[in-house]
Image (cartoon, rainbow, N blue to C red):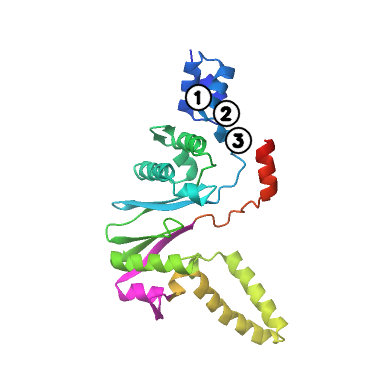
């Protein structure tokens, strides 16, 4: 008889999904050793060996349904796999599963049920069959009011995904803002969102720069305030010059069209991930001797 503890033990040893472990144990009368071989023969336990690799390519994707929108980043090791139909189908399954659930975090999403068991099981299974480490890195869930508008934009086939929520205005304006955010890389919607410690650090750097230019302290302080305005224009969506009309700030463009910006989610694939630099000769030698 195949027990839950046997399935758990096999899963921990191989990194394979729950359903695959159950099938392996059933096919081998509960024999752990034979089940490990069975999984290896099927190529399923390969997933565990890929756990320490770095997945910095992949897809950022969006799905909206009524007043709900989901944005995710799913990583792979190579750009080639990110275009693979099996990978994109997996991304679609994850999106559709999230949108019909109450999950809001990566941890909650990984435990959601799907045809393969859980989303975690699905990712482990696809890691084995596709042959690269795959990873659900980020999830954002946005809920809007009836009179709000979603604007979504996917750049370069999923390299960048932007979801904008506007209060008022229309979908065309919302999409314009999403396209702007994709191009201009704002970190925050407005000044209020900038963390105080980040702002203080920037002030210190700017003051040091002004003092190093030989300016007296009182002049340096004034220069810092001017440069902080410039800093806001670089990192805050509302303060940036609108790409389609440089005479308007984004905030002014939205306001002219009867709206205001409520939120922004901007995912760029691999941002912040340290990519592993491999020595090609060493990698080939590893493959030959491995």
Residue at the spot 69% in from the left edge and 77% down from the top edge:
208
Mark 1 crowd level (few <14, some 14–19, many ≥20, 10 Å Cα) = many
Query: Tag on residue 21?
Result: 1
Residue under label 3: 49
Which mark is first along the chain, 1 or 3?
1
- Measured in 3D between alpha carbons, the distance from the residue under mark 3 to the one under mark 2, in whole angstroms, is 9 Å
Q: Is residue 67 visible?
A: yes
The residue carrying mark 2 is: 14
Q: Nearer the viewer, residue 264 or 262?
A: 264
Helix, strand, or loop for circle 1?
A: helix
Number of numbered labels in the structure image: 3
> Of callouts 2 and 1, which one flags the residue occurring earlier in the amino acid sequence?
2
The residue at 39%/73% (across/down) is 251
Q: Is residue 105 left or right of residue 288?
A: left
Q: Residue furthest front?
A: 288
Q: Is residue 263 magenta?
A: yes
Nearer the N terminus, badge 3 or badge 2?
2
Q: Quadrant of the C terminus?
A: top right
Residue drawn at x 52%, y 73% as measured from the top left: 234
Location of residue 37 (image quadrant): top right
How packed mark 2 is, by other alpha carbons closer than 10 Å (few <14, some 14-19, many 20 or more), is: many
């Amino acid at each position: 008889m195949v027990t839950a503890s046997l399935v758990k033990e096999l899963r921990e040893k191989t990194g394979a999904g729950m359903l695959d472990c159950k099938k392996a144990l059933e096919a081998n009368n509960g024999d752990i050793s034979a089940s490990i071989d069975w999984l290896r023969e099927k190529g399923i336990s390969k997933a565990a060996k890929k756990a320490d690799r770095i997945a910095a390519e992949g897809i950022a994707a969006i799905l909206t349904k009524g007043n709900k929108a989901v944005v995710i980043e799913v990583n792979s090791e190579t750009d080639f796999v990110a275009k693979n139909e099996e990978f994109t189908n997996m991304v679609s399954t994850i999106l559709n599963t999230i949108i019909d659930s109450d999950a809001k975090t990566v941890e909650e999403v990984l435990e959601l049920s799907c045809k393969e068991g859980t989303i975690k099981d699905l990712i482990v299974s696809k890691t084995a069959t596709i042959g690269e480490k795959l990873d659900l890195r980020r999830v954002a869930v946005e809920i809007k009011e009836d009179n709000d508008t979603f604007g979504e934009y996917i750049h370069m086939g999923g390299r960048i995904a932007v979801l904008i929520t506007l209060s008022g205005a229309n979908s065309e304006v919302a999409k314009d803002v999403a396209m702007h955010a994709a191009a201009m890389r704002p970190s925050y919607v407005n000044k209020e969102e900038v963390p105080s410690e980040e702002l203080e650090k920037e002030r210190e750097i700017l003051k040091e720069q002004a003092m190093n230019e030989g300016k007296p302290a009182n002049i340096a302080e004034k220069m810092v305030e001017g440069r902080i305005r410039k800093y806001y224009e670089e990192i805050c969506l509302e303060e940036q010059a609108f790409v389609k009309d440089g005479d308007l700030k984004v905030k002014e463009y939205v306001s002219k069209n009867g709206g205001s910006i409520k939120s922004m989610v901007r995912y760029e694939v691999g941002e912040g991930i340290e990519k592993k630099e491999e020595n090609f000769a060493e990698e080939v030698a590893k493959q030959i001797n491995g």
